[in-house]
Amino acid sequence: MQNISHNKPFLADIDCSDIVNVIKSGFVSYGEQSKCFENELCKFLGLPEGHAVVTTSGSSALYLALNALNAEGKTVAVPSYVCSSLRNAVSFAKGKIKYIDIEHNYPNININELNKIKPDIAIIPHMFGIPVDLDKINKEITVIEDCAQSIGGGYKGTMVGTYGTIGIFSFYATKLMTTGEGGAIVSKSKEIINKVRDFIDFDCRYDNKIRFNFHMSDINAALGRLQLKLLPEFIKRREKIFNIYKTTGLTFIEPNISTVKPVRYRVVLKTNKQNELKKLLLQKGISSIIPIEEGELLYPSSNAVKLANNSLSIPCYPALTDEQVMYIKEKLEEIC
Ligand SMILES: *Cc1c(COP(=O)(O)O)cnc(C)c1O
């Protein structure tokens, strides 16, 4: 009997000596490793050095982004189909939240509705690794790209995260790459990056300004550097697994425009029998999840409710063995 988890970070087979060396060096807080990780992220994303700041989480990166944009009192739009991290960040930054529905049968924000509302700021998640058509967004709206699920994805020849005013990333254990807990904020604007740095560098300051510590540790950053080196391989492996699942002929959520390059963060089946299917897969030792359940939605918008009740995410991650992938494919064919 197989026992396949829905997700598992790729950690068991990495060489941890770099992380051990950081611990042994005695310098474990924000320092050299974190700065190297920041610059390697810039390089990966095609940004000049010095345009990334690593943080404690994707959530803190979101908060820092809103704070750098002086979101207090401004309208901030978020999709209703997303995790609560966005609502929390807007609340902490004292923004006025507006919920926007997603597109019909599609996990990304409805841009027509967004443009109609025309908020000051919009947090735009590229859900499941599928990039949003950012050019369609009214240019007067300041865009924070939420790339927690989409690092390595592309939009019109650039990397996601570098198109909007600010990009944020998460390195939580279930994401495309992990530092355990962690995140990053990037921007083409040096002014925004400087503001973020000033805000988190709270120690040894000689004014009364309120700041807060959201620094990553060098232990996490050393892991992040190892993971970032492997990320292109991770992405290729996910693509390969996704293509094997596609041979079943089942319907998965895929990009509806050709100008984007997705990453296969979540392989999501469209099904009106999600609970039944989940149970049958579990009987075969395969765990699956409803990516966002109806009760978790930030707002019960109609398309969001529909997708919450008609989707099931199946295992797709580089730690899966070839045998496990074939087993999942066969069981899908058997059951569906
Ligand atoms: C995971 C996630 C976050 C939050 O990141 P954390 O590192 O867990 O705080 C934010 N937005 C989206 C779309 C996510 O998937």
Image (spheres, rainbow, N blue to C red):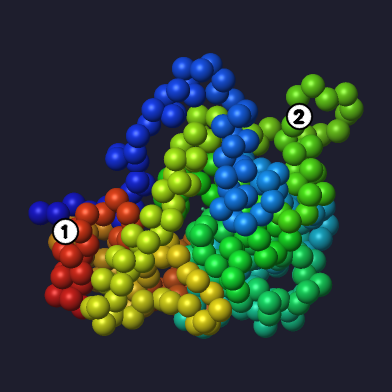
Q: Residue 331 location, x and y as percent?
A: 16, 69
Q: Residue 139 location, x and y as percent?
A: 78, 74
Pick the front one: 191 or 32: 32
Disc number for residue 323: 1
Quadrant in the picture for the C terminus: bottom left
Does any portion of residue 139 appear in the rendered image?
Answer: yes
Q: Residue at x 60, y 74 (%)?
A: 156
Q: Bin the neighbour count of mark 1 within 10 Å (Cα to Cα): few under 14, some 14-19, many 20 and up.
A: few
Q: Residue at x 43, y 77 (%)?
A: 254
Q: Amino acid at mark 2?
A: Phe
Q: Amino acid at mark 1?
A: Glu
Q: Residue at x 34, y 74 (%)?
A: 269
Residue pushed farthest right? 207
SS label for mark 2: loop
**Vertical side of 260 occupied by 61: above or below:** above
Pick the front one: 99 or 252: 252
Quadrant in the picture for the N terminus: bottom left
**Vertical side of 48 occupied by 77: above or below:** below
Disc number for residue 202: 2
Does any portion of residue 304 appear in the rendered image?
Answer: no
Q: For the residues carrying marks 2 and 1, which lies nearer the camera in this image?
A: 1
Relative placement, left or right, of 159 versus 9 is right
